[in-house]
Structure formats: structure tokens, C-alpha cells
Image (tube, rainbow, N blue to C red):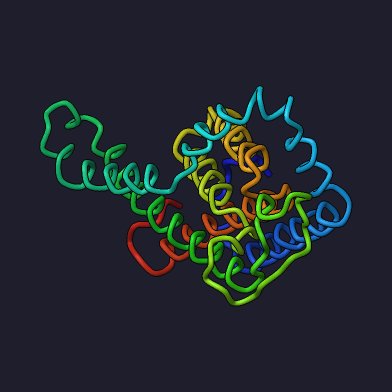
């Protein structure tokens, strides 16, 4: 199924449930393998001084692109502009169908950020995994479940969740550029491992939650409101 063609998937509840279970199951299995065999090795590699000197500062700045507030602003701004401003402008009079699509898209994007964000913070709270930089050897198996402390919110990655929500929703809006959105998400997600805020396994599962949360949001918007995209 091409990455941008979500309509049939969202319309079929049984198919959507199966797809979500496969995505999350695969992501969790990959995260487990990475946790046991690769997380610490990758963290140690990026912890080498010669590597840090080259890329750490750049990664530290780039990673801020993944902050959710940027995309909440885009979602709310798009929705508000297309709901109240664009319909009154002569410039858009001939494109009211497209304007209405982007009004609904902005609203769906907003809900997708909220749904996937809630899922991510639920996993952070339940697992309580310690962030890599809290120990000099980047110990991957220190857990403190049911805590709200930031130091123990490594699994899963919130930035990765945000970026894959962005990639999914921008693919819906601009499907011709779908691989650009995927590469964009991967690039930002990778910085989370470079600066030791997350292990690679956190990034993988956080990315899956961003994608799944977006599908669930579009499903909710389709069935519970008049603002569905499909």
C-alpha cells in the first residue's frame, strides 16, 4: 500500500486494527533487539570525543526542529486561516474546495499531534527508562516506572513521535513529496541518538507511535466529526 493512500485503511476498522498491531508489534520487537544488542554500542560510538567534536553542536541545534510547538502552530494556523481568512479573500475564491481541505487537514493535524503525544507520554510514564546521558557508560536497562521525572522518560522518543506525525500528515497533504517528509523525519530523529537524549530503540518506537497516532486521529475525525479527510 503506497504510503499516502490511507483512505481505504482508515475506512476499514478491522484492517486498521490489524495494521496498527503489526506496526506496533514490529516496532516493539525491533526496539527490544536494539535494546539488547545495539543501543549501548551506538551511544558509545557517538560518545567518542572525536565524534562529539564534529557533530554534537550541530545535532543539538537541529534537534530543536522536532519540538512540538512548531507543528502545533502550523496546525492551528492552517486551520484558522482556512476557516476564517482565506474564504473571504478574492485570491482564494476559485479554490474554495482546496481551502476547505486544508481547513480539515489543519484540524486533523492538530488532533494527530495530541493523540500521538498522549500515547507517547503514556509509554514514557509506564516504562520510566533512563536517558542515555545519565550514566557515563550509557546503561540501557535502568528503569523507574510510573515517574514523571524527565530523566526517566527515554522510552519512547517524543521528538520522533512528533516528526513521524509530521511526516504522515504532510504526506496526506502533499503526497508527491512523501519521501522528502520521510527523509526529513529520519534526519531530525537521528539527532536524538547523537546527543544522547534517546537510545535508537526509543526513536524507533516513538516513530511508530507518531504514525499510529496519526492514523487513529484521522479515524476519529472521520467517524466522530464532519471534518474527516477521507
Name the residue rendered at 58%, 71% in the picture.
125
Give the camera-side residue of 95 and 116: 116
Q: Residue at the spot x=34%, y=42% of the render?
A: 74
Whole-percent x and y of residue 199?
71, 50
Residue 89, position in %: x, y? Answer: 12, 32
- Could you tell me residue 194's position as x and y percent? 66, 37
Q: Position of residue 48 (x, y in %)?
A: 76, 33
In the image, is 72 to the left or to the right of 41? left
As drawn, 66 above or below 207 = above
- In terms of depth relative to the viewer, which is nearer, 188 or 198? 198
Please report the residue visible at 38 percent of the width from the left and 54 percent of the height from the top: 110
* View extreme (right): residue: 37
The image quadrant that residue 97 belongs to is: top left
Q: Is residue 141 above or below residue 77?
A: below
How many numbered discs sit on the rendered protein?
A: 0
Q: Residue furthest bottom?
A: 146
> Residue visible at 47% across and 63% down?
115
On the rendered structure, is 109 left or right of 122?
left
Q: Quadrant of the N terminus?
A: top right
Work out whether residue 72 or residue 201 is closer to the camera in this orientation and state it: 201
Amino acid at each position: 500500500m503506497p504510503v499516502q493512500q490511507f483512505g481505504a485503511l482508515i475506512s476499514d476498522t478491522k484492517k486498521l486494527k490489524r495494521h496498527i498491531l503489526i506496526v506496533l508489534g514490529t516496532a516493539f520487537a525491533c526496539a527490544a533487539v536494539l535494546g539488547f544488542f545495539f543501543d549501548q554500542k551506538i551511544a558509545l560510538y557517538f560518545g567518542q570525543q572525536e565524534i562529539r567534536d564534529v557533530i554534537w553542536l550541530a545535532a543539538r541545534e537541529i534537534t530543536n526542529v522536532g519540538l512540538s510547538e512548531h507543528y502545533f502552530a502550523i496546525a492551528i494556523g492552517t486551520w484558522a486561516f482556512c476557516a476564517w481568512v482565506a474564504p473571504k479573500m478574492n485570491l482564494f475564491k476559485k479554490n474554495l474546495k482546496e481551502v476547505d481541505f486544508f481547513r480539515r487537514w489543519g484540524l486533523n493535524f492538530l488532533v494527530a499531534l495530541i493523540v500521538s503525544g498522549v500515547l507517547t507520554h503514556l509509554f514514557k510514564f509506564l516504562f520510566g527508562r533512563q536517558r542515555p546521558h545519565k550514566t557515563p557508560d550509557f546503561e540501557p536497562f535502568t528503569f523507574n516506572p510510573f515517574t514523571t521525572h524527565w530523566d526517566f522518560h527515554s522510552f519512547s522518543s517524543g521528538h520522533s513521535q512528533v516528526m513521524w506525525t509530521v511526516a504522515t500528515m504532510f504526506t496526506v497533504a502533499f503526497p508527491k513529496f512523501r519521501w522528502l517528509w520521510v527523509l526529513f523525519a529520519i534526519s531530525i530523529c537521528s539527532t536524538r541518538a547523537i546527543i544522547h537524549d534517546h537510545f535508537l530503540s526509543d526513536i524507533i518506537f516513538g516513530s511508530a507511535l507518531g504514525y499510529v497516532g496519526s492514523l487513529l486521529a484521522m479515524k476519529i475525525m472521520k467517524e466522530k466529526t464532519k471534518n474527516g479527510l477521507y
